[in-house]
Image: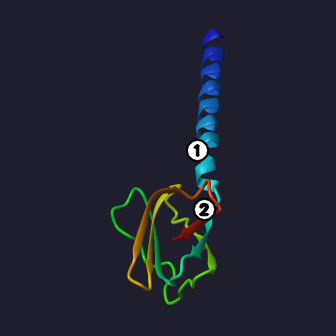
Amino acid sequence: MNKVIHAARAAAVAALVGLFIVVTAAPSQAEDRRVRIINETSWTMVEFYASNVGTNDWEEDILGYDVLGSGDSVMIDIDDGTGYCMYDFRAVFADGDVLVRERIDVCEISSYRYHE
């Protein structure tokens, strides 16, 4: 009888540990990764990239055929499905300037400003 109680107790502890892991891991998956990119420079932003810090490549240009004029903003869902919160940003402007910002926590911010 004692072995049955011990086995049941061990199973309950294992279930609680499993639940704890799921509960603590879930928030990073459920985080809102939408970020408003705000162009406060004098130049039009012609390209914008956001790549998670786990990759060595820039992903596709998020703006595509669109541009982000001076004083304009756009809401971008940065979520690439990997669960990452930390991203590097790369903005290319019409004057040729390229601004790279590293390790932006998109789970913690709701907007990001480019300014002169």
Q: Is residue 66 positioned above or below 31 on the image?
A: below
Which residue type carries mark 2?
Arg
**Which residue, given by chain and number where applicable, does mark 1 sit on?**
25
Q: Nearer the viewer, residue 6 or 85?
A: 85
Which residue sits furthest bottom?
Answer: 65
Q: Position of residue 90 (x, y in %)?
A: 43, 70
Q: CA distance from mark 1 to mark 2?
A: 16 Å
Q: Position of residue 58 (x, y in %)?
A: 38, 70
Using the image, tell me which numbered label, if any, was put on residue 81: none
Q: Badges 1 and 2: C-beta atoms under 8 Å apart?
A: no
Quarter occupied by residue 92: bottom left
Using the image, tell me which numbered label, if any, was put on residue 33: 2
Quarter occupied by residue 88: bottom left
Assign the N terminus to one quadrant of the image. top right
Which residue type carries mark 1?
Ala
Residue plotted at (62% across, 77% down): 74
Residue plotted at (37% across, 60% down): 55
Which element carries disc 1, helix, strand or loop? Answer: helix
Q: Position of residue 112 (x, y in %)?
A: 58, 65
Q: Nearer the viewer, residue 12 or 39?
A: 39
